[in-house]
Image: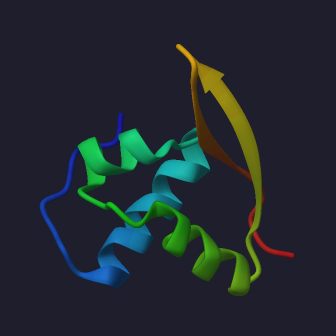
Amino acid sequence: MIKPVATTRYGSQKHHILRWLKEKPITPMEALEHIGSMRLAAHIKVLREEGYNIYTEDVKHNGKHFAKYHLLKEKL
């Protein structure tokens, strides 16, 4: 289980998001609750630029749409 982090540093949040993705998919709500990041999409963009293959799943739940990100491969 991934432990919550109390950090606001951009690099640290990105690191924790990558660790999470290596174990399971992540949603914006999970990123906010467990990592403290309100900018999940921005972190995902940076990880993609670094060569990580991340798939975005469009999820509909209770009439709401949100993204769920899946790490497909470590690096391209």
Percent x, y for residue 58? 72, 38
Task: Name the quarter where the N terminus is drawn.
Answer: top left
Q: Is residue 53 above or below residue 68?
A: below
The residue positioned 25% from the left and 42% from the top of the image is 33
32 or 72: nearer the viewer: 32
Q: Is the image coloured rainbow, by chain, by secondary structure, or in one colour? A: rainbow
Percent x, y for residue 75? 78, 73
Could you tell whether 76 is left or right of 18 in the image?
right
The residue positioned 50% from the left and 42% from the top of the image is 27
Q: Hey, which residue is sitting farthest front in the picture?
A: 63
The residue positioned 38% from the left and 40% from the top of the image is 30
Percent x, y for residue 40? 46, 62
Could you tell whether 59 is left or right of 26 in the image?
right
- Using the rendered view, name the quadrant where residue 37 is placed: bottom left
Percent x, y for residue 60? 65, 24
Q: Is residue 59 above or below residue 8?
A: above
